[in-house]
Amino acid sequence: MTKEQRRGRAIAMTPDEIDAFLDEERTCRVATMGTTGPHATPLWYAWLDGALWLTSLSRSQRWADLQKDPRIAVVVDAGVAYDELRGVELRGKVEVVGDVPRTDTPVPELEAPEQAFADRYTGGVVVRDGRHAWLRLTPEKTTSWDFRKLGR
């Protein structure tokens, strides 16, 4: 269960608005903590059944960071003008799902996320390149904002 947002309730998104927003947007920004400090990178994602699914190169700085410390913060945002800004921050610990790196060995738990990701980014074709692996973030804390609500 995710913690309830305490500050900024007037501009917070409802759970349905969060789901719709995360379904609509395409790029997230992932922050990990490494030995030399924070590391932030953009990634594609799939939002499915209350979990954020990320595919990451298993030989990346992000992957190395998460193997040492699975805590992560992910931001998805949109808008240009101040009164258009909206977004969601998800925090928690990621878990590795399936093979590292991903192989063609069937993993029932990955069927839905892989297909959702493929439908979203690769024309429905599931790509397994032997270099990426799957991470699942089930948020422990969710914070959202929608500045469009300020004028209401």
Image (cartoon, rainbow, N blue to C red):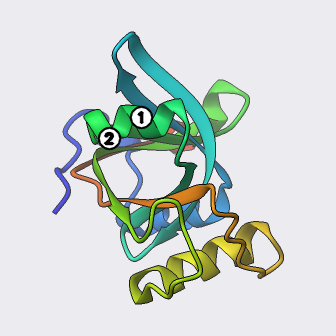
Is 152 located above or below residue 16 in the figure? Answer: above
- For label 2, the residue is 67
Tags 2 and 1 in contact by the CB under 8 Å rule? Answer: yes
Q: Quick one: 75 or 143, which is closer to the camera?
A: 75
Residue 136: % across, % down? 38, 61
Residue 32: % across, % down? 40, 30
Q: Is residue 151 visible?
A: no
Is 111 located above or below residue 79 in the figure? Answer: below
Q: Amino acid at mark 2?
A: Gln
Q: Is residue 56 visible?
A: yes
Residue 109: % across, % down? 39, 83
Q: Amino acid at mark 1?
A: Ala
Q: Quick one: 125 or 104, which is closer to the camera?
A: 104
Label disc, if present, on residue 44 of the rendered structure: none
- For label 1, the residue is 64
Q: For mark 2, does the 10 Å Cα neighbourhood hold few (<14), some (14 to 19), or many (20 or more) residues?
A: some
